[in-house]
Structure formats: C-alpha cells, structure tokens
Amino acid sequence: MHIAWLGKKSPFCGNVTYGREITNALVHRGHRVSFLHFSQTDSTESPSHSQGHDEVSIPFLYKSQIATIPSPRSGKVLFEALRDLKPDLVHASLTLSPLDFRLPEICNELGIPLVATFHPPFDRKRRNLTSSTQHLTYQVYAPSLAQYDRVIVFSYIQRDLLTKLGVPSDTVAVIPNGVDVEKYSPGFSNIKREVNAERLFVYQGRVALEKNVESLLRAWRHADLAPSSKLLIVGNGPLAPSLRAFYALDSSIVWLGFISDEARRIEILRGADAFILPSLVEGLSLSLLEAMSCETACLATDAGADGEVLETGAGIVLNTQRVATQLQTLIPVFQDHPELTALLGRKARQRVLDRYTLSNNITALEHLYDQLVKRSQVFLGTSV
C-alpha cells in the first residue's frame, strides 16, 4: 500500500517521534511511504527517518514544537504533490496548522481517503487555565475532524471528548501510542555511576508550563532525601533557563538538557529507579511508555490518558491538583523502598507488553487503512 504521510520532522517533539516510529515500521512491513512535511525547499535538514521514504517539502512561514503556519502557496503545493503521487491513502499527523482544516477538501477532490491522528494534550476535568485552553483546541478542531474519514486518538477518554463535540463515533478510532519493546527494554546502564547516585529519579520532556516541572522541583527541594539521591532533568524548553538558574545551587538536581541520541535516552531510563511526569495536560505520553517499557517505576498525573495507562497497579497516579504536595510525600517512599520500585517497574513493563507495543499499533493501523482503501475502491467503482 502507498501511504502519503503528512507530519513533522522538526523541531523535535512527540509528533516528530510518532511520525518517525510509525513510518519506519510501515516501510519495514513493505509499504511505500511518501513523507510530506513543512520545510523550505532549500532546507539543509537531514532527518534521521528519511530512509525508505519519498519526501515532499511543504513551504511554511513559521513552525515550532506546538504549531505551524504554512505559506500561502502550501495548499497548492500539497494538492499537486498528492495528485502526482497518487497514494492509496493520506495519513495526517496533525501539526496544529491552518492546512489541517483544508485537508478534507483537498483529499475529497482527489478521491483519496484521509486519516488524521489528533495529538493535542488535554485534561478531561479542565481543572486549570492550561487544560481549559487545550479543551478549546478540541472545540475548534471538532467540526473539521468530522469531515475526515477516520480520526485516530490515543485513549477512550479522548474519543469520548471528541464525540461529545460532534465528531461521529464511527469516525473516531482508538489506537494508542506504541513502543518498540525490543529496543526499549530493561538492561545495563552506567548512568548512576556517572552522576554518583544510589537512587535515581528522572523527568524527560519539555520544560514548559503545561509540563509542570516546577512542582516536581519544589517537591524535590522540600522532600527529606539522602544526598545520594539525584534527579535528572532531560529536556529543554521555555522555562528551562529560569528554573535551572533558580535551582542552580542544588547539586542533587542534574540538568542534562535535550538529548537527541536515542541510545543515550534508553540508557538513562534503564538506570532510573523512578520516572516522574507531573504534567497539567497530556495526550498519551510516549516518554512515559518508553520508561515503562524499560521496567522503570512510574509516577504520572491523570492528565490526558496517562492515568489510564498506569491504572490498576501499573504505576502511581497523581491528581493534577497539589502535585508538589503529593510528590513530596511519595519521592521519599520510592527512595527508601527499592523493592517497591522494582515491583512497579515489572508491572509497568508488563502493561506495555499487554497494551502498548508498536507492533500491535501498526497492525491496527494496517487494518484501518485496508478498510478505508477498500471502501474507497467500491465508492469509485474500481472494485465489486
């Protein structure tokens, strides 16, 4: 099957990782993938996941980890590219771009089935300003998503939210994020020795308001911890400079910044005793699933679908209210009881094996693609 994938290759974010993992897996299974992404035609970007893909650059005016502003001619470039490529199906990993709203019209004119993956984080209870803002994103997108042939979301909570906003229930498919469990697996790590730690706690992700890293840092400062316990902050973002400066004198907090080397990130997760995700809003955190797959005990808020991932004993679920207070109590418990972190790590790994493998994810996608392509062939009169 020939899939035209419209997504992001930079700057690095969860959408980039999602596109890389899915398209590489599709190519590995024998499908042809054409990757259409926002890039200047003279761009020197050399994405690591280009092998096996045809590539088409879509012009843009601005792009960030959160949103993209296409150029005025982007719609024409996309239309002509899809017309010439003649894919069996278009899969758009939505980039929060105005072009997202034009895709149904473009694909309908060309007679190509259209699938979207809808990524924006959310908090089902709208407990703060950040979660209310994200809920508005769902309200704005819902009328357009109703025009797609299928909309993929990562959890049943997310599906229920979209159907309440008017997207037909048979349009929304739940296919969670998936992890390569052979790559992200328990194994040797030297990271504790490197940072001189006996007990190691890790946060990995953007250092931004919605990630609520400051609550974790505040809890860490006020918890009763041994000098040999260390907290690694892996990632960068708009709040990183100010938070790093404020906590600069605390030698138990190690700031590693953004790490592009996947093998290095895996080594860190393998060596961690606990992974902490204090977000105010989430979708389904791939970093959380990767930590779980490495057999790391996990604590995460119930924002988005993360609470659903850890429910019934696969980890510790925090309320998004008073995160610092909860962590201040729990982190010392995790420090003092290695048998607890070992048990939760095994349960986390098993949960991923049961529900969140990349292999199962791709199989579900192939089934969805097959349904839509066959339906399109019948509609166009090319099949009986």
Image (cartoon, grey):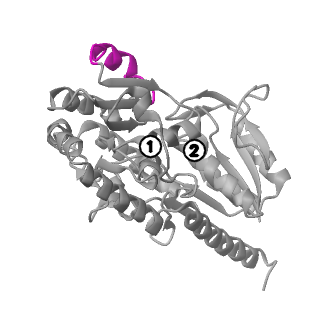
Q: In which quarter of the image is residue 368?
A: bottom right
How far apart are the two marked residues, 2 and 1, measured between alpha carbons?
A: 17 Å
10 Å neighbourhood of mark 2: few (<14), some, or many (≥20)? some
Return the disc, 2 or 1, that comes first in the chain's sequence.
2
- For the C terminus, give its image quadrant: bottom right
Q: Which residue is denoted by mark 1 in the rendering?
A: 269
Residue at position x 19%, y 36% in the image = 324
Q: Do the residues labelled 2 and 1 touch (CB within 8 Å)?
A: no
* Residue with the most extreme bottom position: 384
The answer to whether residue 355 is visible is: yes
The amino acid on which the numbered mark 2 sits, given as a three-letter code, is Thr
Q: Which of the two residues, 14 or 139, is positioned nearer the viewer here?
A: 14
Q: In this view, does 4 lie above or below 249?
A: below
Residue at position x 83%, y 53% in the image = 85
User: What numbered label is drawn on residue 305?
Assistant: none
Q: In which quarter of the image is residue 380?
A: bottom right
Q: Is residue 203 magenta?
A: no
Q: Where is residue 73 in the image (x, y as percent from the top left)?
A: 72, 34
The stretch of residues the image draws in magenta is: 235-250
The amino acid on which the numbered mark 1 sits, given as a three-letter code, is Leu
Q: Is residue 146 above or below residue 225?
A: below
| Element type where label 1 sits in the image | helix
Q: Which residue is denoted by mark 2 in the rendering?
A: 17
